[in-house]
Each structure stands twice: as C-alpha cells, then as structure tokens.
Image (cartoon, coloured by chain):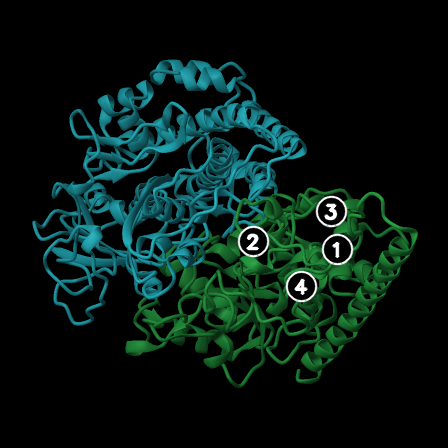
Amino acid sequence: MSSKRIIGPIGRVEGDLEVTLTVEGGQVARAEVNAPLYRGFERILQGRPAEDALVVAPRICGICSVSQSVAAARALASLAGITPPPNGQLAINLVHAAENLADHLTHFYVFFMPDFCDAFYSNADWHDETVRRYAAHRGEHIRHALKIRARLLHIMGQLAGKWPHSLAIRPGGITTPVTTSVQHALRYILRDVREFMETRLFGARLEAIVEATDWVSLNAAMAQHLHPLPDAAWFLRLAEACELEALGRGPDAWLSYGAYPGADGNLFAGGTWQSGYHPLSLAAITEDTAFSKMQGDTPLPPERGKTHPELNKPDAYSWCKAPRYRNQVMETGALARQVVHGTQLAHELVRRAGGNVLSRVVMRLWEMARLALAMESWVNTLEPNAPGLLNTALPSQGSGIGLTEAARGSLGHWLSVSNEQICLYQIVAPTTWNFSPRDHLGQAGALEQALEGLVLPDKDHNRIRLQHIIRSFDPCMACTVH
Amino acid sequence: MPKDDSLDRIAERLGLSRRAFLKFCTGVAATLGLSSQAGVAMAQAVAASRRPSVIWLSAQECTGCTESLLRATHPTLETLILDMISLDYSETLMVAAGHDAEVARHAAMKENHGKYVVVVDGSIPTKDGGIYCKVAGKTMQEHLYEAAEGAAAIIAIGSCASWGGVPASGPNPTGAVPVSEIIKDKPVINIPGCPPNPYNFLATVMQLITYGTVPELDKENRPKFAYGRLIHENCERRPHFDAGRFATEFGDEGHRKGWCLYKLGCKGPETYANCPAIEFGDVGGGAWPVGVGAPCFGCTEKGVGFTKPLHEQAKVATHTPPDMFPPVHPDVGQGVTPGAAALVGAVAGAILGGTAVTVRELGRMEKQAHDEHDASA
C-alpha cells in the first residue's frame, strides 16, 4: 500500500520548503522536494547596467547576502580582469567569514537544536536540560548565542555599513577604509567571539578543536570541562542517543569552489571528491530542467542557461533547477568543503558513515572554530590605511564567473554583458545543489536521496527524523529558487 | 517613578537590567520623536503583559527583514518582540511545522479576531493566478486576504511589501505587487528599506502597543518619524557636497578622504529615510552605507532603488552644486602688493558671504521641499 504525504510549510528553515513523500510499507519510496517560491531574479537582472548586479543579486537572499555580494563582485571582477588589493581582500574575507560563522551559529542554536526539545523525546533523560537550553524562543543557550551573534555582526557595522545587503563589496575591493580604530574594534569583537566559543560552545581552546582528527580526539578536546557540558559536547551526546549518524545519507559526492582567497591561495581549497579528490572543472557543471517547472529539456551549462517558467509541464514539481556535475548529483556545504579541502576530521567522519546528519553538523561546528582562528589572523594582517579598493572600468561586453562558498556551500554567478548591459545572469546556489529535483536520468537530488529509504515507524518518530535530516543541510530556500 | 515590580520582571525575562530596558524604551521613544516620559509609558505597556497576537506572513522575500530584526542588539527580536507580542505564526522562527503551524495560525486568528497585527515581508505575486508563492497549498494572495480580514493593523516591512522592491522591478516576471495593492479596505503601514532599519519597525510596533495608535504617516503611508526627511539632509558628508568636494572614482583621493559620493551615483538627495541619523549595525560612528563609502542607492524609495542605475546621478530636488567652488583661501604669491592683497581679501570675503547665503538659501529651499512633501501627504 502506498500513500502520499505533503510536509510543509517547514518552519525554521530560511524560506519556503515543501516535501512530498510517497510511503510504501512504512518506508519512504520517493521524496520530492519543492521550493514553492519563485521571483525571477535572473530575468530581473537582464537589461541592466552590469554594475547593478551589485545591488540586485544580493537581494536573492537576506541570510547569505554577503556571499551573494562576493559572487556578484567576483563575476564583475573576472569580467574586468582585476583583483582587489590585499587589504581589500582581507576585509572582504572578514565580512564574508563573519556572515558564514554567524550562519553556522544560527543554524546550530536557532534552527537545529530546538528539534530535540520536541515532545517526542520527552522521556529521554536528556530532555529537560535540552529544553532549558534550546527551547525555541526561550532556551537559555539560544539567548546566549543570539547575543554573541549580534556581537559578531558588529563586524558588519565596522566593515560593511549595513547587513544584510551591504553595498561595500565591489569588484575592486571594499569601499570601507580600514583604520587602526576599526582594526582594534575587530580584535575586541573576535575576542568576545572566541570567549563564547571556548566557554559555552566547545569548552576547549579553538586550536584544540581545529586539531581534532577523529571522533575520539574531538570528544576528548571538549570533555575538559564536564559541567555544564558545552553545547557541542551536548550535541554529540544527543547525536549518539538519537543515532543521527545513521540518518540522512546523501550521495557521498562533494563539491566545493574553495573560499577566502589569500596570498597563498584559498583558505579552503576547491574541487570535488568522488571516492578521491579531483580539481574543479567548471565545464562539468550543467543545470537540468527535466523535473523543473522551467522550459527546456536539455541540460545547459550556466553560461548558456535559461530561466523561463513553464506552468503546465507534466511531472515537473519544483521551481528549482537540478545542477549536476558530470551528470552526477553533488552535495555541498561545510562537510563537502572540508572533505574537498582534505581536513582529517571530515575524512574520518565520512569513512565511518558517509555524509549524514551527524557529519554535516559536526563539520559546521568544526568550521566555526577554524573560521574564528582565520579571522583573528586576517585582522592582524590588515594594514591600516592601505588601499583596499581599485576603481573598476567594466568592459562593454564580455563574460565573467564569480565563484565562492556560502555557509551552505558552493555559490556561482555566471554573467554575460553586451552593449554595457547584462544579457545573461545565471545563479547556481548551494541549496539548488542540495535540494534539487530529479534530472533527465531520473537521479534524485541530494536531500531526496537522503530521505528515500527512510524507515517510518510511527507518525511522531517520522516527523522528527524528517526534520533532523532536512535541517542537517541547513537549507536556504530563498537562494535555491531565485 | 514609583518602583514597579512588573518592570523588574520584564527586564529579567529579557535578560537586561531594569535600567538598560528603560533606556532602550526611551531610545525608541526618541526615534519616534516622543518625550522620555513616553519611553517610560512604553516600558510599562510592555511590562503590563498585554501581548497582542502577531501573524507574520512571508511572501516573496529573502528573509533579510527578519534577519535584520534578529540582529538588533538591544534587545533582539527573539527577546523583545517575542516577549512583547505573541508571535503566533512566523515561518522563520516558529516551532511547529506543516499542519501544526497552519493550525496554530488559524487558532490565533480566530481567538484574537479584530485585535491581532499582521506583518508582511515580501511582495505578492499576482501573475498566473499567484502560483509563484504558495504556502500550504494556498497562494500568498489567499493567505493575505484571510489574515487581513480580522487584523487590527497591517504592517508591510521592507521595500518588497511596501512598494514591490526587487521582484516588481524590471520586467516583473511574477506580477509582484505590494501589500497595499491587495488589501485596499484597510490602511497598510509601510516600513520600506532593503532591509529597513530594525528600529523603525520596533518603534512603530512599540507605539501600536503602548498607545494603540499608528505613528503619523506620509502620503506613501510611511511613518514620518523615519521617512520624513531626505538622507541628504542629515548626511554627515553634506558639508562636502556644499563645498563641492566629491569622490569622482571609487578608491580615489576624495573617496578615501570621505568626501561626498554624489558623483558616484549616491541617491541620498532623492531618498527619504533616517539612515544617517540612526545608522546600522549597532556600532555607532558612521556605520551605514554612505558612512563606509558606499553610495546610497535609494533602497527605501520607490522609483529610485532597483530602478535607477547605480552610476546615474541623483535628481537633487533642492540644489545642484557647481563642479567646484572658487577656493576660499587662494594661494597668494610672494611679493604681492598690499593693494592686491586687500583686493584678494575683499573677494574672499565676498565668496565667503556668498557661500553663507547659498547655504542659508539651500536650507530654506529644503524646508520648502520638505513642507511640500508633507503637504502632499
């Protein structure tokens, strides 16, 4: 017997999301992920002066708006053939990492952990303490986290002027002059961030977290202060109790464009991992529309991409296109980034049980520590009053690609200009990869794969497990369909 | 003021000191242009645990408006708004999912019929039957009609909900319209901006809660306390504009020195908002786009933001400066005769006087333009 269930709206994700499940014999036989919001950004961008991508494109998403700014600015920089001066790049890295770190923090405390307060778990011995810490709106630890998040976002005040949707990031660098006083202010902010993470989140020095190479050393690093258990250690305890490592196995193929450029290359290297590392080949990327409510049946590379809604397309169930890499489904995000970069802990987790709810969340936590350390070193490398911005003369025609990593994974903007106007703008966002619908080969998207085969023993159990799996990707639906 | 336990209790709930809480309320009152006594009234209203129910509908949005509220430091949306109001439905923040969430929303609307506040972020797509934004199988248009019916007040937060924003710009692929074009039988308070300053929203909500009244609105239904003046009027770089000192390229000397950004396309002269006065990011000291050297592009203003190209120079309603004013202190060569020096002095004096008159004139013209703006409200 098979039955069809639609789950949606799903709260505490960024934007609108619906999932349709076909259940057969107590198991998910088919999952269809739908992003029910479409705005038409790629068409709205056409016909504008190229520079205007800087204000229009970031509006796709108010959560990873800096990532969108960075991608748009890099697409224009590649069109113009320029690179920001080192000081400008450092400042951009700081703004970008602040957003990504804040996103990871919000995801963990505000979106992910409250699920463990669900009445379904009320008999567990850890439930009361979990509610005290993470109950939505009230949890004590959520409040601590929001306080430090606000503090972290003071970096936006210092360097970006406004957040979300800063105007400070440009192809030639950043408009903000970095003075000694800004540098000092940044140091103080990062000191507070470190203190929060070392006392409340990890209960360990950030350096020790970053050096953890496997499950045992990660646990050992955090178990130094046992009472009260720091939040990351508390999560590991819940993860074990709820068997999160067995939930939500994805395609186990990972993509990262690499991020945070510096004098010695990117802080996180780009590439793919499919049973081994491969350098990035942009020509391998296509967007498939076989099951998207979009015209066309042939997969197209983004530089020739089209976005024309097609309302009466049989079988189509999402506004989202299906990006593929050499026709393969890829997962992207913090776990993917660290697997591709070669971080030992990520490889150890993946060796144990592939991409799953646990490994995704752990690598997000690990990355928070890594980013905080990187930010400290960038602040110290800043050179007060050194030029951070080059003027950019944009050519009247040509094309450009802007790649970066948002908190949730790989983000790319493809742009073509003729007669000084944008004639093509295609955006492939992280959750477009993760939450894509099926493609012409019938391959399910990464989340769909993570849901299919899930055993559904009873109603309450199902609901909560589905939520763990969906949220483990930290979806950003505003970006997914734009 | 007599010691009031309820204030202590709310301060404790919010995790603030009583003093910090009162200070915050007084600050909000000041944003609204009210006296500090009003701040105390607000603090008491918040503490009195009258918690109006709020239904937050997200239409074609980017979550940026919610994010900016979560970011406000003193206190956050989570702590303040959630303690002041009963947020019965918000996709971004709610606990429930799917069917449960819909049930909660309907229960809140029924129970508080005629008393709840609807907040909308995002524009409403109307093309092709509104299918471009559907929640729980229903179009946003249907959700909005349903929620507005029993609402005491409707607030459109952000430019998308206020006048269409990005989705409605250019070819408007989804037929996106603002809330006020869907709900015509009730006034909609518009708080435009992309995102708007969170304090403008908070202040409006505080006034609703404290006095049950709506702040005075202009003809675009925007609160005058926030959108009553041009950015240009309060901009800290205004003296550079008046003196003719402009950045002419990004990263040039003028740009690095913090001169006026008018020639880089700054839309401050045609954009109504209080950004330079209240700033962003809670760090003080010039944290707003122009303050960090990024020209305003008019995100609050219909017909400017997302409509005029970035590089296009703003229409200065009040006054267009010359490319350069004559120098006030011209270099005087050596060996100048006393007569020539006297002449230079006289000319300099005339220029100074002239400039002063220009500035005074400008002030008068701006007041006029401002009054016209108000009069047409």
The amino acid pointed to by label 3 is Ala
Between the residue at mark 3 and the residue at mark 4, the CA separation in whole angstroms equals 38 Å
Chain letter for mark 2, please: B
Which chain letter matches label 4? B
Mark earlier in primary sequence (2, 3)? 3
Residues under labels 2 and 3: Cα distance? 49 Å
Looking at the picture, how far across and down is residue A47, in whole percent?
33, 66
Query: Which residue lies at the image location 56% right of the left edge and 53% below the top edge?
Result: B248
Quadrant that contains the N terminus of chain B: bottom right
Shown in green, the chain is: B
Q: Amino acid at mark 2?
A: Thr
Disc 1 vs disc 3: which is toward the camera?
Answer: 1
Q: Which residue is mark 3?
A: B11
- For marks 1 and 2, give the CA distance: 19 Å
- Is residue B133 visible to us here? yes
Residue assigned mark 4:
B232
Between discs 3 and 4, the one toward the N terminus = 3
Which quadrant holds residue A474?
top left
Q: Chain of mark 3?
A: B
Residue B135 shows up from this direction: no
- Residue with the mark numbered 2: B248
Marks 2, 4: nearer the viewer: 2
B156, above or below A250, in the image: below
Q: In this figure, which residue is indicated by the disc labeled 1?
A: B327
Between B44 and A263, the residue placed more toward the observer is: A263
* Element on which disc 3 rests: helix
The amino acid on which the numbered mark 4 sits, given as a three-letter code, is His
Q: Amino acid at mark 1?
A: Pro
Left or right: where does residue A198 sit relative to residue A452? right
Per the rendering, the colour in which chain A appears is cyan
Marks 1 and 2: CB-CB under 8 Å?
no
